[in-house]
Image: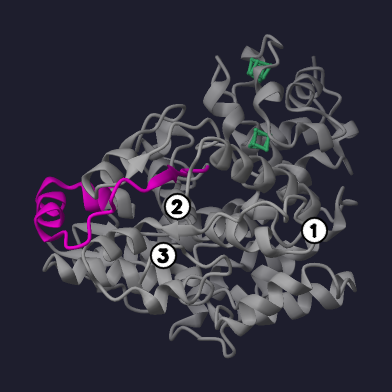
Amino acid sequence: MKTGYYPGCSLHSTATEYNESVLAVVKAINDEVKEIEDWNCCGATAGHSTSAELALGLPLRNLMLAEKEGFEELLVPCAACYNLFKTAQFEVAHGQKQDLVADLEHQLGLTYQNKINVLNFIEYVLKPENIEKIKKLIKRPLGGIKVAAYYGCLLLRPHNVVGFDNPERPTKMEKLLEALGASPVRWSAKNECCGGSQALSKPELVVRLVNNIVTNARDNEAELIVTACPLCQANLDGRQINWDFPDQNKQLLPVLYISELIGYALGLPAEKWFAKHLVPPSLKA
Amino acid sequence: MAYNTLTMEIAELSHQPVSRCFQCQKCSLGCPVAEEMDYLPHQVVDLINKNLTEKLIGSNASWICVSCKTCVQRCPNGIDIGAIHDALKNIHFQQKLPVGVKAVADFYESFLDTVYDYGRAYELGMIVKHKLKTKNFTQDMKMGLQMFLKGKIKIAPHKINKIWEVKNLFSSVKGSE
Ligand code: SF4
Ligand code: SF4
C-alpha cells in the first residue's frame, strides 16, 4: 500500500511535535509514508468562510497531487485538514462545483478519480496490522495513568461526511489508550468544541469553551488530555497558561498529542516533543 | 412567495433543506456559542423561510459561529447552519456588506493573504498583519510570547513551487490579476 502524507501548515509550525511524533511512530512500526510534493494550505476556516471556490479548491489541489503521485491512501494527522479533505471528497462525489473540478483537472493535467482513502492518525494507528505491531513494541506501558480522550469537532462532524467514529459517543481513542496501558476516564466534554477557529479573533469566547473542557476533564480525575488536532492542542494548552484563563490557580492539565503518548509508550525519545508544551507533561521523558 | 435575491443566494450557496425545519430548536440548544449570537441558529433558519434575510446583513451570528457542526449533527432534518453561515460570510465578502464582527473578518483576510502569497499559511506574517489591522497588541501576548520562545512559530515562510496554481484559485475572491 502506497501511503502519502499531508502534514499541513500547523504541523510545520505550531505543531512540530505532532509532526515529529507521528513520523517517529510510523517509522517505529516499520511503515513508510511520503509527503505530497508541493502541497498547499487546505484553507482552514478562513477558506470556507470566504469563498466556496477556495473551500473546495485548496484541499482538492492536494488530493489531485496525491492521486498524481499514485497514493492509494493519505495520512492527514491534522483534524482540520482531514475534515476539509473529507468534505472536498464528499462534494466531488455528489457532483457539486463540477466547473471548478474540471478547471483544476485541466491545470494539473489529470483526470481526477476521487478514490484516495483519507485517514486521520487514529484511523491509521487502528489499522489491524498497525495496532498489532504497536502492542508488541510497547516498552513503557502507561501504568494506568488517567487520560481524557478529547475528540473535539473536526474528527467527528458531520458524521455523514467524515464517518469516523460515533459523533456523540466516540470510543476509538479510548480503545487505543487501553492498548497502551492507560485508563481512559469517562467524561462529557470529549466532543465539545474548543473554539479553535476563533483562537485569534474572539479569544474571550474561546476562554469560556476551553475552561469548560479542562474543568470537566479534571473533575473526572484526568491527569492529562490527549488530542489529535493541532488547533485543539494549541488552544487547550496555551489558554491554561494565559493571563485571562479564569482557572489558573488550579492544577494545570498537560495536553498531549495521541502520537506523543504512543511514541512514549514505544520507548521513543520524547523529551524534544514534550519541551514544546506550555503546560509541561508530567510523564518522565 | 417570491424570494428576494439574498434569500436565493443563501439557498444556492448553502444547499440546505431549510423548508423542512419545524423549529424544534435542537440546533440552538447544542450550539456552543449561541449565547453570543444576535440570531440563534433556529432563528436564522426561520428568517430564511420567512424571506426576512435582510435582517442577517451585519448580524454577528455568522462571524461568531465556530463551524463546530453540532447543529447539523443533531438536527432531525439534517440542516447545516454552519454551512448557512459560510454562505452568508461568502456573500458579505463578495458584496462588501458590513460585517458583524470585524476582528473575525480581518483575521480571515490576514490568514488568506499569506496563503495567497506563499501557498501555505505563515503564522508570523499573519499575526503581525492581524495585529496591525486590529491594533490590539496586548491581547494574548503571554501565550504568543511563550509559543515563540518554544520555537512553535516559524520565522521564515515557505513558498510552494507552483504558486500560480494556488493564486488561480483566488480569482473568484481577488479577481484575476
Ligand atoms: S434543529 Fe433543525 S429542525 Fe430543529 S430548529 Fe434547528 S434547523 Fe430547525
Ligand atoms: S456550526 Fe455554528 S451554528 Fe452550528 S452549532 Fe456550531 S457554532 Fe453553532
Q: Which residues are magenta?
A: A123-152
Which residue appears at 58% of the width and 36% of the height?
A219
First-in-chain label (3 vs 2): 3
Tell me the subunit letter for badge 3.
Answer: A
Outermost residue, bottom side: B156
Q: Is residue A110 visible?
A: no
B83 sits to left or right of B139: left
Say which quarter of the image contains residue B171.
bottom right
Which residue appears at 52% of the width and 58% of the height?
A254
Which residue appears at 44% of the width and 62% of the height?
A103
Tell me the subunit letter for badge 1.
Answer: A
Disc 2 is placed on an element classified as: strand
- Residue B24 in the image: state x and y as whole percent: 68, 10
Residue situated in front as seen by the camera: B13 or A76: A76
Location of residue A226 with respect to B114 vertically, above or below: above
Quick one: quadrant of the N terminus of chain A? bottom left
Identified by mark 3, the residue type is: Arg
Q: Residues within 10 Å of mark 3 (few under 14, many from 20)?
A: many
A184 sits to left or right of A96: left
Mark 2 lies on residue: A227
Say which quarter of the image contains residue A31.
bottom left
Mark 3 near mark 2, Cβ–Cβ under 8 Å?
no
Identified by mark 1, the residue type is: Asp
Identified by mark 2, the residue type is: Thr
Choose mark 2 or mark 1, whichever is in front: 1
B122 sits to left or right of A1: right
Tell me the subunit letter for badge 2.
Answer: A
Residue situated in front as seen by the camera: A260 or A60: A260
Disc 1 is placed on an element classified as: loop
Asked if residue A144 is among those painted magenta in the image, a careful observer would answer yes
Mark 3 lies on residue: A61
- Residue A98 in the image: state x and y as whole percent: 44, 48
